[in-house]
Amino acid sequence: MRLQDKIAVITGGAQGIGRAIALGMGREGAKIVVADLQADKAQIVAAEVQSLGAEAIAVETNVASEMSVRRLAEQAFARFGRVDILVNDAGTYLKAPVVSKSEEDWDRTINVNLGGNFLCARAFVPAMRKQKSGRIISIASSIAHTGAREFADYAASKAGIIGFVKALARELGPDGITVNAICPGSANTDMPRRHRSEEDVMARLRATPLGRVLQPEDIAGPILFLASDAAAYITGQAYNINCGTVML
Amino acid sequence: MNPVALISGGGNGIGRAVAHRLAAAGMSVIVADYDHAAAEQVRGEIADAGGKAEALAVDVTVAREVKAVVTDVAQRFGRIDVLINIAGGSFYTKRIEDFTWAEWQKVIDTNLKGTFLMCREVAPLMQKQKAGRILNTGSNYGVTGSALRAPYSAAKAGIIAFTKSLALELAPDGIRVNTVAPGPTDTPRVMEKETPEARRQRWHAAIPLGRTAKPEDLAELYYFLTTAESDAITGQLFHCNGGLV
């Protein structure tokens, strides 16, 4: 088991990619803190992880709130005593043209997607520095590179994550902490279904060079690798997982 | 049956570490190298560790040699699941006006043409199998450039773009093609030219993780990209450089 007894905090862990990461890390022997705004769903995922034989707790968390992130850190340390892995997956968006996007909606996307990275890193980095080890993995998006119509706030926040990750990697390298981003293409989760028909979603998901539908597990695999000792020399990168739709 | 992996440049440095890693994971490894004695040495090391390996001599810049090696492997093993192209090198550090045409061609051919020739011979077999993974070797210099290494930087940038094109071409057949880009790595070839102390002074401050790579660091990334966990990844560039780039 590649993550035996490691403690992992996964924001946005209650569904989709975050849930796949929580289950994948649990299978590899990690103890999991499922942090999510949706407390009931986080609880369900924590129970799923426990059923794999791994320890897990759920913590209701708003990553855009300093107070809430502080409580998340307190509960994680109270239960497990340390944190080895932070996965920043909590994210949101509201599809709308730039000209009709409200300031409140803009702030919400940027504060959750990008600000959440900052607040969570700030909450867990001091302990990682003391341990002289740690892994921070942030979920960006191919849209950071390509942009997407009516997703300007989301694109900006995800590109911001990549810049943040590179800067933080330089800052934390001397302490043996690696910081990387993953840029998934559109995946088979609930998110795209909020604004498209089922038929449309599946047609778009199948239209990749590999002809394969990107599943949450496809994204969890590389994250398990980055969290493991095998990736000790990799930092400051933004790896693309998208069945070949975007190549950089 | 064990998956079959063909590794060019498998006799030394990063290639040797990759050969060991894949063999440890249960693959049958064909160590192909210009330096046959080195390939033979690695074959022996793997066999001693209980793994399966063969050694072959190949000059990747010579089309008929590449064809002969791939035909030989295909006949003996019946398939090639993984192709890893590592044969290469920068060979020279000098100003552009001092490079001869022959030197330019040596660098371009060993790195870029060698990668093309190996892929050209192996791809049809993988297309028949409807499966396969190809990993080419780039460099951070293929992205950033490097003073005094113009042909090497050009060749490595070429490999990155070649890889993307090949990934698009082979994706319908379920074949994945990616590039691994090592940064400064402690291979015997570079360690011969520089004392550990000089090397530490040159790189320590520039690399956030504070050290140059061991070949084994790279071998883990190559291995990961051959596993099912990377099945949704193609046409991508994977830097492994301690945060230098």
Image: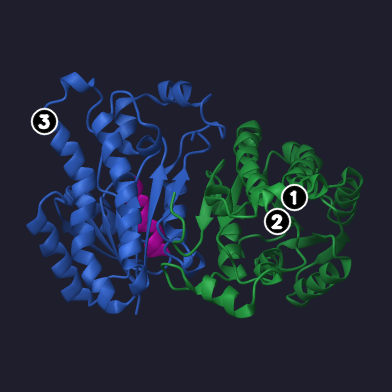
Chain colours: A green, B blue
Q: In the visual, does A164 lie left or right of A7?
A: left
Q: Secondary structure at mark 1?
A: loop
* Residue B199 position in % (x across, y down): 42, 25
Chain assignment, label 1 = A
Same chain assignment for discs 1 and 3: no
Residue at image point 60% right, 58% down: A223
Q: Quadrant of residue B89?
A: top left
Same chain assignment for discs 2 and 3: no
Q: Which residue is mark 3?
A: B101
Chain assignment, label 2 = A
Q: Work out whether residue A189 or residue A81 is closer to the camera in this orientation and state it.
A: A189
Q: Quadrant of residue A114?
A: top right
Up-down: is A42 above or below B108?
Answer: below
As for residue B16 lying within the magenta part, the answer is yes
- Number of the label disc, if any, that sits on residue A101: 1
* Residue B30 position in % (x across, y down): 25, 63
Q: Work out whether residue A210 or residue A121 is closer to the camera in this orientation and state it.
A: A210
* Residue A233 position in % (x across, y down): 52, 43
Q: Quadrant of residue B138?
A: top left
Q: Are marks 2 and 1 in contact (CB under 8 Å)?
A: yes
Q: In the visual, does B207 lie left or right of A112?
A: left
Q: Work out whether residue A103 or residue B36 is closer to the camera in this orientation and state it.
A: A103
Mark 2 Cα-neighbour bin, 10 Å: few <14, some 14–19, many ≥20 = some
- Tag 2: amino acid: Ala
Write down the region rendered in magenta: B14-24
- Number of the label disc, if any, that sits on residue A96: 2
As for residue A91 lying within the magenta part, the answer is no
